[in-house]
Image (cartoon, rainbow, N blue to C red):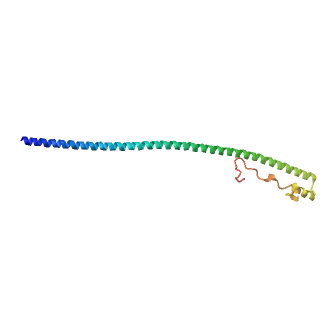
Amino acid sequence: MAKCLESEKHGVLNKIIEGNIRLGRLEEKVKGYRKQAALKLGDISHRLTEQQEDFASKTAQYQQEMRHLHRMLQDKQDVLDKALQQKREMEGELEVVWESTSKENRRIRELLQATLERTGPWDNTRAFADRCLDGISQGDVQDGCHFSFCDLKPPPTAHQGLREPLG
């Protein structure tokens, strides 16, 4: 019986030793898995940090580009505003010149008509010899000049563009 107990004791001890060995191996595997997980976690953390840095860099670059584009847009808007202001000023000046020219043409026409009424019909040689009257027929001179620059349409108003049709 003692031998039986002794052998049972050795069997139990062997099983305990085998269990401890198996437990040691499992603990080593767990340590290996933990190391692998820690390495992978470290790698993922490193990549995530790199991505965050890259994202921050790209964000800063895009913001700088947006500021640059905004400045360019503002510069172009300023140039456009100045051009439109100059256009309005030029249209105003053209309107003044047109009105002045129209008044001057009216004055010249009235003066010519008054002169014709005072002096009577002109003699043919003088009317056609006068270089100032080259484009005017004798009938027009005697009738009081049916054509006048005043008959032209006025310049476009400030609301009409120079290239828009009049009327």
The residue under the point 90% across, 57% down is: 129
The residue under the point 81% across, 53% down is: 149
Foreground residue, 30 or 141? Answer: 30
114 displayed left or right of 94: right
Q: Which quarter of the figure has residue 66?
A: top right
The residue under the point 21% across, 41% down is: 20
Q: Position of residue 133 (x, y in %)?
A: 87, 56
Q: Position of residue 21 (x, y in %)?
A: 21, 43
134 displayed left or right of 46: right
Labels in figure, total: 0
The quadrant of the rendering that contains the N terminus is top left
Say if 131 sits above or below 25 in the image: below
Foreground residue, 53 or 117? Answer: 53
Foreground residue, 119 or 131? Answer: 131
66 displayed left or right of 35: right
Q: Position of residue 39 (x, y in %)?
A: 35, 43
Q: Position of residue 160 (x, y in %)?
A: 70, 49
The residue under the point 29% across, 42% down is: 31
Q: Which quarter of the figure has residue 29?
A: top left
Say if 27 sits above or below 125 in the image: above
Foreground residue, 159 or 86? Answer: 86
73 displayed left or right of 156: left
Q: Residue furthest left?
A: 1
